[in-house]
């Protein structure tokens, strides 16, 4: 089995629980396609136990699931899983039960009583790989699994399929209901417009059709109510050039309709190869640059903005990246203030999300450096939003604003609050409509 497909199947098995707990999740893949050799039951078991462990640690919040296969420095292939979460955690006794189930025991050298934080390393009994667990108190939890794997790298499509700027609509009434589909489609050359309600997307289709604007060649919708299929079948018949995909949870009764529906019904999450196959189906005649020039491109399609996340906590790095990429932004991470200054000089971001508490240069000091540079033209102007935790929030907010920051967010960051704050401080481009979420 190919590794990214194995990871996709593992996430599919836990998504019903994620949805029942109203958790928002983000999923991504990186690295090579890798065909696993021999039996892989142990890797599936090891992946499942960590996914379940992370989910069981949270009552509400945001989860990040990422995986990759890379060639290590020793020439051996390594599969890595990085899982993180932030939000309202379960009781400490419940987290302790999860740790016991995962055979992760905190000793005095790994726990910090003053903050409640802990770091634990152990061996995964299912794979023999290395498990890392980090609990950062109310800021969140991070887990990882690194395991040596046997097999061989397999080439994906070469070159990767490229939609060449063709439009796709992504629709989910549940935040994160399509995980990272919009971002992964953009990697394959799609121009993606996102909608928070199916009726809004259908209305936009009708409006664009009547105005002679370019129509999407892909419409991906997350099933939430169970009524989506009935609404999408007329759309699929009316727009034969548009590939209509309904993404459902494993076990959905809608999967029974696959054999006789014009809608392409697929289980969530969509794998990398699912999206590549959809891209390969773009009709060459209707996706050429010449044909796209025959009708105007809608204003709601635009290039994503760039956010620099500055934070020394691995938990916050993974969670903030996942949240921002889910919202449609490109993300770069700096692990400290000095690195942030260097990155801003190399390529200025559209906005900075700045942690307050960092060694060497903290968030206030880094912000003052950036504002001084902007005054003399070393870097262009861009907004800076603080992200911090701790006590005496009123004092810390005042300190951030006095240093020249444009906004303030407390950790753990709620997805909706983060989206609203970034949208508030980030000016619109000329001719651009605010469409990260409709």
Image (spheres, rainbow, N blue to C red):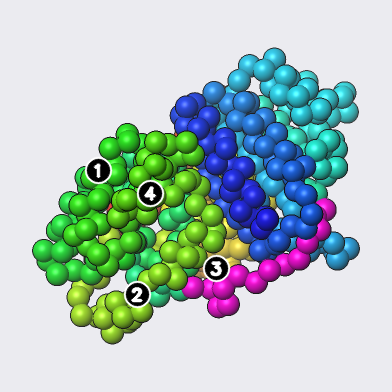
Disc 1 or disc 3, which is closer to the eye?
Answer: 1
- The part of the chain drawn in magenta is 148-161
Q: Residue at x 74, y 39 (%)?
A: 46
Which residue carries the number 3 mark? 347
Q: Which residue is mark 2?
A: 283
Q: Residues within 10 Å of mark 3 (few under 14, many from 20)?
A: few
Expressed as whole percent of the image width and height from the top left, the position of residue 381 reads 45, 61
Closer mark to the observer between disc 1 and disc 4: 4
The spot of residue 378 in percent (x, y) is: 53, 68
Tag 2–tag 1 contact (CB < 8 Å): no
The dot on residue 115 is none
Using the image, determine if residue 314 lies above or below residue 218.
Answer: above
Q: CA distance from mark 4 to mark 2?
A: 22 Å
- Looking at the image, tell me whether mark 3 or mark 2 is earlier in sequence order: 2
Per the image, the residue denoted by label 1 is 230
3 or 2: mark nearer the eye: 2
User: Mark 4 sits on what residue?
Assistant: 258
398 relative to 325, above or below: above
Q: Position of residue 206 (x, y in %)?
A: 15, 57
The structure residue drawn at horizontal position 28% and vertical position 84%, both measured from the top left corner, is: 290
User: What main secondary structure does the magenta stretch of the protein show?
Assistant: loop
Quadrant of the image containing the N terminus: bottom right
């Amino acid at each position: 089995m190919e590794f990214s497909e194995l990871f996709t199947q593992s996430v599919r098995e836990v998504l019903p629980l994620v949805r029942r707990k109203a958790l928002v999740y983000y999923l991504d893949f990186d690295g090579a396609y890798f065909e696993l050799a021999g039996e892989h039951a142990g890797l599936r078991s090891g992946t499942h136990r960590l996914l379940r462990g992370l989910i069981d640690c949270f009552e509400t919040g945001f989860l990040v699931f990422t995986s990759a296969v890379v060639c290590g420095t020793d020439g051996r292939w390594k599969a890595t899983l990085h899982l993180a979460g932030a939000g309202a955690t379960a009781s400490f006794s419940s987290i302790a039960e999860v740790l016991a189930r995962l055979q992760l025991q905190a000793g005095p050298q790994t726990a910090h009583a003053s903050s409640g934080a802990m770091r634990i390393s152990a061996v995964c009994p299912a794979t023999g790989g290395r498990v890392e667990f980090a609990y950062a108190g109310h800021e969140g939890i991070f887990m990882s699994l690194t395991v040596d794997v046997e097999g061989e790298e397999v080439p994906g499509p070469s070159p990767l399929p490229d939609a060449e700027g063709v439009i796709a609509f992504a629709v989910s009434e549940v935040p994160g209901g399509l995980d990272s589909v919009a971002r992964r489609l953009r990697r394959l050359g799609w121009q993606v417009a996102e909608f928070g309600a199916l009726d809004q997307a259908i209305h936009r289709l009708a409006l664009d059709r009547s105005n002679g604007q370019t129509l999407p060649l892909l419409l991906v919708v997350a099933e939430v109510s169970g009524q989506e299929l009935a609404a999408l079948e007329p759309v699929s018949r009316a727009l034969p050039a548009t590939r209509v995909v309904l993404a459902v949870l494993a076990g959905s009764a809608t999967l029974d309709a696959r054999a006789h529906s014009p809608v392409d019904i697929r289980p969530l999450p969509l794998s990398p190869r699912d999206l590549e196959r959809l891209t390969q189906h773009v009709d060459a005649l209707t996706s050429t640059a010449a044909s796209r020039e025959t009708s105007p491109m809608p204003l709601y399609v635009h290039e994503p903005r760039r956010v620099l996340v500055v934070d020394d906590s691995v938990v916050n790095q993974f969670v903030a990246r996942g949240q921002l990429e889910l919202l449609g932004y490109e993300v770069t991470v700096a692990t400290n203030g000095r690195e942030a200054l260097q990155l801003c000089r190399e390529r200025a971001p559209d906005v900075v999300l700045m942690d307050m508490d960092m060694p060497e240069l903290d968030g206030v000091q880094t912000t003052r450096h950036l504002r001084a540079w902007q005054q003399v033209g070393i870097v262009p102007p861009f907004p800076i939003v603080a992200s911090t935790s701790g006590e005496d929030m009123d004092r810390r907010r005042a300190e951030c604003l006095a240093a020249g920051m444009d906004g303030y967010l407390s950790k753990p960051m709620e997805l909706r609050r983060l989206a609203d704050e970034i949208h508030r401080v980030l000016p619109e481009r000329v001719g651009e409509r605010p469409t990260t979420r409709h």
